[in-house]
Image: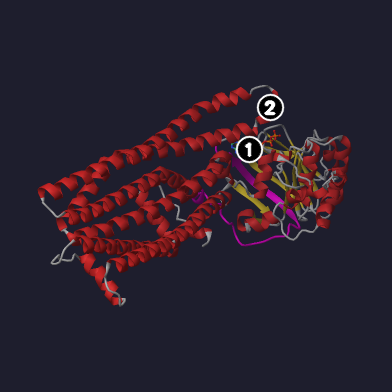
Amino acid sequence: MSPSSAPKATSTAQARGALPMVRAFVQAYPGRSAAAFVAVFIAGLMDGLGMSMLLSMLTLTTSGAGHKASLPEQVATRIATFLGLQPTAPVLLALAILLIALKAVLTLLANKQVGYAVAHIATDLRLAAIRSVMAARWSYYLKQSAGRLSNAIATEAQRASEAFQYSAEMAAMLLNSLIYLGIALSISWRAGLAAGIAGGLLLAVLHVLIRTSRHAGQHQTRLLTSLLSATAALLAAAKPLKAMAREDHVDALLSDQMKQLRRALRKQVVSREALSAWQEPLLAIMVGIGFFLSLVVLQMPLAAVLVMLFLLARVVSYLSKSQRSYQQIVVRESAYWSLMDSIAAARAEVEPEGGTQTVQLSAEIRFDAVRFRHADGRLVLDDASFAIAARELTVIVGPSGAGKTTLLDLVVGLHRPEAGTISIDGVPLHELSIREWRRQIGYVPQDTVLVNDSIAYNLAFGEEGLAEADLREALQAANALEFVDALPDGLRTLVGEGGCRLSGGQRQRLAIARALVHKPRLLLLDEATSSLDAQAQAAVIETVQRLKGSLTILAVTHQERMIAAADRIYRLAGAQVSADPAAGQPKRSLQA
Ligand SMILES: Nc1ncnc2c1ncn2[C@@H]1O[C@H](COP(=O)(O)OP(=O)(O)OP(=O)(O)O)[C@@H](O)[C@H]1O
């Protein structure tokens, strides 16, 4: 099964609850669900037949001649005769043992199918959640919290998949209780009816505990989401918090949510244990009443009463077990719906593929009368027209917060202009295949992002087919080869969480190498040399100068050296782009 077989994300308008969830699972995994159901059904029949053998053996040894055989006894006798055996007590016992053993084997097979399905569901839900977020618009991604996403992928997917396991258990228990109810009805409809009513009563009386569990589960889902969002955000700021001795602040911020979560979990445990604790005595009371009614009121023979009570106890006990499974389903149901909501919301914000055209960036990137504002209404570009010539170094300068990073994001296609056109070699960006365009880009963000893996991993970053020589060449170009070679494990060195085992300057050089390793046509540098010392800066700028004849470079910078090396300089301020007189003479005309 593929992640596409994960249950379909639904809109909030659709029916919620445990049953629609189970239906979605069954629709997503019809093969495994059917196999598990068939195995459980046959296992239930084997169990029923095995018990019929035992009951026949019991009545055979306790009832005298003239006893009218019940349906299960007739079936047991017929099976024995069909097998060419005399329906004697030892034969019936042996057949009962065989059938019960067969039931165990079939139950194992059913559980195996369910186990596979559970693993698939968890994986498919996780992949569906990750893919939906990664495929969403950048503006949507910016609104998400990493903690919420981690919670959806780790906890909610796990709880949702466990709900399937409990659904299978509940179905098995319900089937078994129905089979025993059938046997009881075939022996005496009165006794069968009594068993049915007793079971129904038991479920109804204890249903209040199911409601408590559902609420506690919903509470748990909400709390885990906000708790993990807050935790991830605070952990990201661990260093300044620790450096200023404010770690207690984390404790204070999280402790209230922790307490609430503990309360929700305690409620779940209490209602789960209360359900088991109450089911036992209620079952015993019902058996006692049944015993009294059949022996004293209905004056049934003891052997028949024992058989009936045994069946009644089986029906009610299977129903109780199915109720316990149902309780576990409703505890987890909210995790499933929360995850489905997240997936549906991300899919509704899917980033358009763009057009089908491709370009090689051989002439220019042009902004024509471009206007852009962020979602909060902040105007970043207003009627901006300028050109970035291919194979040149173009530098953007401007005050902090003017919108330089936003301008780079517009070139990448992460944001779309509200008016005007951004075109590459004359083709509007929205007509280009956006992924094809981005594959040509090497991007060095303002804040270096390294993942907790090796240097080699961070350089390749998912790009396939790179040889070690390619990595070394990129490191050389970024003036990073020397320090990487000096590390004991070289390219295999682990960089730590967020690259914490490297200096800021080293991290930045690795980010530059990563942007160069796939030989891009356009290199975007967002304050890419801000953490480097003068020597390292000079080396990177030398590389940039060397590269600019063969690739297009657009750099946001405040650094004099980079500005001095530029072919064109634009200043962004007050939502206007202009040639920058303060940054020295513009090397080329503003209007390309
Ligand atoms: N996703 C966003 N939603 C709303 N406003 C944003 C968003 N991103 C940036 N801004 C705002 O847009 C403006 C431009 O931000 P941007 O990061 O592009 O500026 P910048 O010129 O690169 O700044 P700096 O030199 O300080 O890095 C800022 O006022 C910022 O607060």
Q: Amino acid at mark 1?
A: Val
- For label 1, the residue is 380
Secondary structure category for the residue under label 1: strand
Secondary structure category for the residue under label 2: helix
Residue 379, relative to residue 294: is it above or below? above
Q: Percent from the top left, x then y, of residue 72? A: 23, 65
Q: Nearer the viewer, residue 494 or 294?
A: 294
- Indicate yes or no: mark 1 CB to ligand 1 under 8 Å: yes
What residue do we see at 31% from left, 69% from top? 91
Residue 496, labelled with which disc? Answer: none
Q: CA distance from mark 2 to mark 1?
A: 31 Å
Residue 565, relative to residue 355: is it above or below? above
Residue 16 seen: no
**Residue 365 appears left or right of 185:** right
Q: Percent from the top left, x then y, of residue 493? A: 78, 46
Q: Percent from the top left, x then y, of residue 212? A: 35, 37
> Can you tell which of label 2 and label 1 is closer to the viewer?
2
**Residue 199 appears left or right of 103:** left
| Residue 52 is inside the magenta segment | no
Residue range (magenta): 346-375
Coloring basis for residues: secondary structure
Q: Amino acid at mark 2?
A: Pro
Tell me which image quadrant ligand 1 sits in.
top right
| Image quadrant assignment for residue 89 | bottom left
| Residue 373 is inside the magenta segment | yes
Q: Dot 1: few (<14), some (14–19), or many (≥20) neighbours within 10 Å?
A: many
Residue 240, labelled with which disc? Answer: 2
Q: Nearer the viewer, residue 355 or 371?
A: 355
What residue do we see at 60% from left, 34% from top? 233
- Indicate yes or no: mark 2 CB to ligand 1 under 8 Å: no
Would you say the residues marked 2 and 1 are in contact, meaning their CB atoms lie under 8 Å apart? no
